[in-house]
Image (cartoon, rainbow, N blue to C red):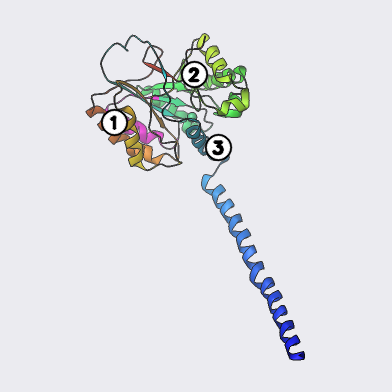
């Protein structure tokens, strides 16, 4: 009996020891590895701006199903049967800009860059380079911060002006074309400025002389931080079938290495389909998700 009691006591002590020595280091390990992961994640992005940019890319994709039917405004060129491709790169300049520019130069293709505000002189230098190489510059807001730009018409206008002031200083141009971060029918804007904020901003910006552009072909390169090259190529191919005039959405972003990799093949494929490449302007083909504001 006493032996049995002692065994039970020893078993209980063993259990307690197990719990103390076995579980507590495991917990510690979990805590440490989570901590390390957090630190590693932070270190790999480097700066907060890039983390934000990556988040917004994904948010843009989530906010935008690809099968939305847009409103094509009549334009002088729309009657022509010529196939025209307008490649557009959003969110740059970035570490990828030089690669994109080199490929476009090699392929003899002009494109449109919807840029955001950058503070580093190295990145700011690309604004002028883009213009000098014959591409079109468009405004994509200075901050690309949904919470701010979509909080009011005045905020959107102010942020657009802030970028245009920077572009005037650094590249000598004030774009009269722009693309809304997330596109003109993004739903994230509602949280910041209410249900009709996009229509209100579109009306105001159009009234003061701007033209905005959405897209009718998504490369889907915002579907992941870095989407496989082949997926990007196949999206361009499948989304452009049956369309004579295409505005192709792509991103110029540090993480979009596969967009750069897919670009030469995408251009070659589009050329084979008979597309000519042009830049967007107020007189070019227009594609907008929202109906003309009125
Ligand atoms: Zn964007």
Secondary structure beneath dot 3 equals helix
Question: Height in image: 71 above or below 240?
Answer: above
Instruction: Judge depth for marks 1 and 2 and give the one in front.
Output: 1
Secondary structure beneath dot 2 equals helix
In the rendered image, the residue lying farthest to the front is 1
Query: Magenta part of the protein: which range?
Result: 94-112
Which residue was labeled with disc 1?
267
Instruction: Judge depth for marks 2 and 3 and give the one in front.
Output: 3
Q: Position of residue 98 (x, y in %)?
A: 38, 34
130 sits left or right of 181 in the view: left
> Gap between marks 3 and 1, in whole Å?
30 Å
Q: Is residue 208 in view from this perspective?
A: no
Q: Position of residue 209 (x, y in %)?
A: 49, 10
Quadrant where the N terminus is found in the figure: bottom right
State which tag comes first along the sequence, 1 or 2: 2
> Gap between marks 1 and 2, in whole Å?
30 Å
């Amino acid at each position: 009996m006493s032996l049995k009691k002692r065994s039970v006591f020893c078993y209980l002590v063993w259990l307690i020891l197990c719990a103390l020595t076995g579980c507590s280091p495991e917990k510690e390990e979990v805590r440490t590895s989570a901590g390390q992961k957090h630190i590693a994640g932070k270190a790999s992005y480097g700066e907060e701006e890039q983390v934000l940019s990556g988040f917004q890319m994904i948010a843009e994709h989530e906010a935008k199903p690809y099968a939305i039917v847009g409103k094509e405004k009549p334009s002088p060129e729309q009657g022509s049967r010529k196939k025209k491709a307008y490649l557009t790169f959003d969110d740059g300049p970035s570490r990828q800009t030089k690669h994109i520019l080199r490929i476009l130069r090699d392929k003899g293709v002009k494109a449109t860059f919807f840029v955001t505000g950058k503070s580093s002189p190295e990145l700011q230098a690309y604004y002028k380079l883009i213009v000098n190489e014959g591409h079109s510059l468009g405004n994509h807001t200075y901050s690309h911060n949904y919470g701010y730009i979509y909080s009011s018409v005045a905020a959107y206008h102010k942020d657009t002006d802030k970028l245009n002031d920077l572009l005037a200083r650094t590249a000598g141009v004030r774009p009269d074309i722009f693309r809304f971060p997330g596109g003109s029918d993004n739903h994230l804007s509602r949280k910041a400025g209410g249900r009709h904020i996009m229509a209100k901003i579109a009306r105001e910006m159009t009234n003061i002389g701007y033209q905005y552009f959405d897209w009718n072909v998504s490369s889907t390169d915002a579907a992941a931080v870095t989407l496989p090259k082949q997926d990007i190529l196949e999206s361009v191919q499948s989304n452009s079938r049956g369309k004579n005039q295409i505005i192709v959405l792509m991103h110029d972003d540090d993480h979009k290495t596969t967009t750069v990799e897919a670009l030469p093949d995408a251009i070659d494929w589009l050329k084979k389909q008979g597309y000519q490449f042009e830049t967007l302007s107020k007189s070019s083909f227009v594609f907008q998700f929202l109906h003309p504001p009125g």
